[in-house]
């Protein structure tokens, strides 16, 4: 069976070495040495001033919304994983959907202004598939209307914009370190902000608001992560060059093997360097997609319809029309991509697709 992804696992002994040290210290969670080491290594690797390691990428979004004091309406993309929208609703804000650019599949900056009203407080955009948004265009509109910007950068470990980590942009960026993501800590995530002040709030909020053992700066929640999860991150970070290179190699293979077929792919902006953590293909019709999925499934290959359905159709939002996202979400499929995926398996996958589209 070939799934769309498979969690990366380093040699078991590398993790076990960390376990022995955890047992010796008896320090399992609460800002332990491995959590601190992971945060320091991530800040160094990504060249970021501030980063907080959290229990997952969804709590990262919720804490980001809280730390920026967002209320009222948040402009967001209909083409993302459900956590982008559910976090807005969970924090008692209203999700206002802005349709996507049909080429990049990211929120269309040209459509933002027509949705801005007196209650708009922020823009929450996703860099879909690790492919950076038009950050300059989004920031320009945010500055003009005094809006905050959060990027759901869950897919973006290693992605760059103008030569810097894409996590360096916006008021806050969030990432997911879930087992299925390019870099993972089993469950986990992070919040990043260029602002010292916001970063400090994010830090208090992830730890019940504590600013001392017996004092509280403000309301907080438990968004902490453990020494065991940090250990997995430290192990995986040692393999990150190989993990990232394998994505580039697999992308090159797929590009070549699928050449000439009636498929398209998201456009990448000139100033953006994606991590190619996913391999999305856009079919000419939903019918062609369904036919291909059926053929792949019959060979025990399970790609995923990331992202379907469009989020503006969720039953707990005010449904607003986003024709481009609705159309694309019916026609896009992500092919398997993970370190252990072999060339023979990619050959099988691409041959099945080629036959299905004949
Ligand atoms: C994975 C993902 C999340 C959620 O991250 P978790 O760590 O699973 O909570 C949020 N947004 C997007 C776009 C994602 O792909």
Image (tube, helix red, strand yellow):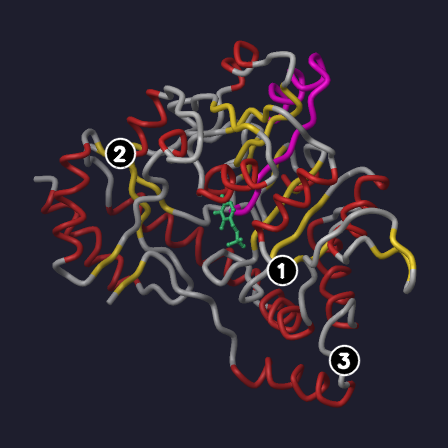
Q: Is 355 inside the magenta-drawn segment?
A: no
Question: Where does the N terminus fall, quadrant-wise?
Answer: bottom left
Distance (Cα) linking label 2 and label 1: 32 Å
Q: Quadrant of residue 259?
A: top left
Q: Are marks 3 and 2 in contact (CB under 8 Å)?
A: no
Question: In the rendered image, which residue does mark 3 sit on?
Answer: 27
What residue is at 40 percent from the left and 29 percent from the top? 312
What's the residue at 24%, 43% (across, down)? 258
The image quarter in which residue 232 lies: bottom right
Element type where label 2 sits in the image: helix
Q: Is residue 5 left or right of residue 351?
A: right
C-alpha gap between disc 3 and disc 2: 48 Å
Task: Give the SS element for disc 1.
Answer: loop
Q: Position of residue 32 (x, y in %)?
A: 78, 71
Q: Residue 2 at x, y = what percent?
A: 27, 63
Contact check, label 3 and label 1, Cβ < 8 Å: no
Can I make out residue 164 in this image? Answer: no
The one nearer the camera, 305 or 345, is: 305
Which residues make up the magenta segment? 135-155
User: Mark 1 Cα within 10 Å, few/some/many (few <14, many 20+)?
Assistant: many
Q: Is tag 2's residue or tag 1's residue first in the polypeptide sequence?
A: 1
Q: Residues within 10 Å of mark 3 (few under 14, many from 20)?
A: some
- Mark 2 or 1, which is nearer the eye? 1
Relative to 290, 323 lies left or right: right
Identify the residue position indicated by label 2 in the image: 330
Q: Which residue is mark 1?
A: 55
């Amino acid at each position: 069976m070939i799934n769309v992804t498979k969690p990366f696992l380093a040699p078991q002994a590398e993790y076990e070495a960390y376990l022995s040290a955890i047992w010796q210290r008896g320090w399992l969670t609460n800002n332990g040495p491995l959590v601190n080491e992971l945060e320091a290594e991530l800040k160094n690797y990504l060249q970021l001033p501030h980063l907080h390691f959290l229990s997952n990428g969804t709590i990262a979004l919720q804490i980001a919304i809280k730390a920026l004091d967002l209320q009222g309406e948040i402009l967001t993309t209909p083409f993302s994983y459900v956590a982008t929208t559910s976090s807005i609703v969970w924090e008692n804000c209203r999700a206002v959907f802005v349709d996507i650019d049909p080429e990049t599949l990211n929120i269309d900056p040209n459509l933002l202004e027509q949705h801005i009203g007196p209650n708009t407080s922020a823009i929450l955009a996703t860099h879909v598939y690790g492919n950076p948004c038009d950050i300059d265009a989004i920031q320009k509109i945010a500055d003009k209307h005094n809006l905050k910007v959060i990027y759901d950068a869950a897919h973006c470990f290693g992605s760059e914009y103008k030569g810097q980590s894409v996590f360096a942009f916006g008021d806050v960026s969030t990432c997911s370190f879930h087992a299925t993501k390019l870099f993972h800590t089993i469950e986990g995530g992070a919040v990043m902000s260029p602002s010292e002040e916001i970063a400090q709030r994010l830090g208090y909020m992830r730890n019940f608001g504590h600013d001392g053992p017996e004092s509280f700066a403000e309301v907080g929640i438990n968004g902490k992560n453990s020494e065991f999860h940090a250990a997995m991150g430290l192990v995986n970070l040692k393999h990150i060059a190989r993990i990232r290179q394998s994505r580039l190699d697999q992308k090159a293979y797929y590009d070549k093997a699928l050449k000439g077929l009636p498929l398209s792919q998201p456009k990448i902006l000139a100033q953006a360097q994606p991590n190619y953590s996913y391999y999305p293909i856009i079919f000419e019709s939903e019918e062609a997609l369904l036919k291909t999925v059926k053929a792949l499934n019959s060979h025990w290959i399970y790609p995923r319809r990331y992202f379907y359905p469009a989020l503006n159709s969720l039953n707990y939002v005010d449904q607003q029309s986003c024709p481009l996202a609705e159309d694309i979400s019916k026609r896009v499929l992500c092919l398997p991509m993970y370190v252990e995926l072999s060339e023979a398996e990619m050959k099988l996958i691409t041959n099945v697709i080629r036959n299905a589209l004949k």
